[in-house]
Image (cartoon, rainbow, N blue to C red):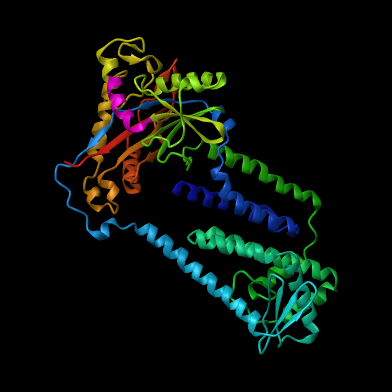
Amino acid sequence: MLPYIIQVILFQILFLAIYDLFLSKETFFSKNRFYLLFTSIMSFIIPLIKLPIVQNSVSVKYGVLLPEVVLSPETIIEEQEWYQSINYFGIIFWLGVSFFSVLFIIKSYTILQLIYKNPIEKKKTHSIVLLPENSKAFSFFNFIFLGENIEDKRRQKVIEHELVHCKQRHTIDLLLFELLKILMWFNPMVWLYQKRISLVHEFISDEIVSKSSEKNKYINNLLAEAFQVEQIAFVNQFYKKSLVKKRIMMMTKKQSNKILQLKYVLLLPIITSMLIYTSCSNTDETGSVISNINRYNEGNLITVLWSKEIPKTKEYSVEDLTEAERKEYNVAINNETERISFLMKPRIFEGKNGKKILHYNSRESVGMSMKYYNYSQGYGSKYTINKIPLSMAGVFPVYPGCEEGDRDCFNTKIREFVLENFDFNFIKKCKTHDCLFDEVYVHFIITKEGRIAKIKADGMSSELKKHAMDIVKKLPQMKPAMKDGKPVAIKYTLPLWFKMK
């Protein structure tokens, strides 16, 4: 969930930066409104999109499952206090959601009270709510709230201005961001989006109303007013002192050349880049029939999945597969055999959209991988040359202090490094009970330059995953793996098991 939230915020920052730099000063107000609405919604959708064509076009890295590291403290860990098992981040999040929900309800109730307690003049397309003894002027859906203290000679222009907000459904835009503020109250980008679209609403209304009257007179009218401001974010108000200068500047600005509308084409490469990024990233969360999945490959007909839990869907045999599915099944089996272990036997289950799931038990994989290493080192087989798997012959990095080609030294050094850097006192500090009984799979890549990159982790405890990733980040730079005389990147999966004595 956290990677998804980070991506949403980063995409919104990029979209707003493009708006501020290239679009905000142009007079294409309706297009700017669409841009702000479209990009705010797309920032939530793009991280969820995984394009198979992009995933399949990326060159496959060699993958290795390392021997597991068993982490067992020498002293018995004391039972956690009640306050240590509380998920404080979750509590803070829901407190924020509750606070802004209550705030929204109060503001909505305030609007409804004004409607029911004050006299209303009903028109064909709108209703005017007369507010006694004040000079407020704002709109909410088809209701225009008008203070009785507003001078008669200015009242009509105020109504025309607010009527544009009503006809163009500007309230819906503001309500959208108000709801996003409830769900993502911690995200400042939502607040900035709402501020910018409120200003665009005023530009649109000013442009339309000033066309039907003398522009200078309309500007003087705007400068002469000093209405009370209703402190509700999801109403469109005629007068807001902080926006008056910007509105006047935009009304007196020369109309932008139509050729400048090509700036909106910037959206295409930006969204394409975002889709490529999210499709290639390892932050995929399927949320489907299996939880806690390590995804290794997704084909057109067969999806290869690794998980602790067995899917609760219909199971198939190889004989049940179509000819096309069987071809892809054989390719997938060969790929997984090269990556992990030829000793493991997958099962076939029904998946989404008519696909089949080729399921490997990740809980079983660690034990199998150890058998695989022992088997390949202790006995010869058609899968090994000089105790090294065919697919990995000569393809692994050199850990500092190890001789080139010494895979056992590489595995041992990784294990020693983890044990030396793991803070067993961290378990006592952990605020969730999962820390005591979790197994974590840390995925990382040793790049062509021998550096550690793209670190991810799977496990129940978010705190233990973070601690495990912090350890892997500290791994030293290594001499990169070589394949056919060229450096190659290799993806590793490091299983960490924490066991109580």
Location of residue 33 with respect to 130 vertically, above or below: above
Q: Quadrant of residue 498?
A: top left
The answer, for residue 77, to whether it is visible in the render is: yes
Is residue 372 a member of the stretch shown in magenta?
Answer: yes
Kindly give the residue lying farthest to the bottom in the view shown: 133
The answer, for residue 476, to whether it is visible in the render is: no
Classify residue 492 as left or right of residue 8: left
The residues colored magenta run: 361-373
Pick the front one: 199 or 306:
306
Residue 7: image location, x then y, percent:
51, 47
Q: Residue at x 54, y 70 (%)?
A: 104
Location of residue 127 with respect to 473 vertically, above or below: below
Residue 147: image location, x then y, percent:
69, 84
Is residue 462 a member of the stretch shown in magenta?
Answer: no
The quadrant of the picture occupied by the C terminus is top left
Residue 15: image location, x then y, percent:
61, 51
Q: Residue at x 49, y 70 (%)?
A: 102
Pick the front one: 394 or 386:
386
Secondary structure mostly seen in magenta is: helix
Classify residue 476 as left or right of residue 29: left
Residue 295: image location, x then y, percent:
45, 33
Q: Residue at x 42, y 65 (%)?
A: 95
Q: How many marks?
A: 0
Pick the front one: 82 or 322:
322
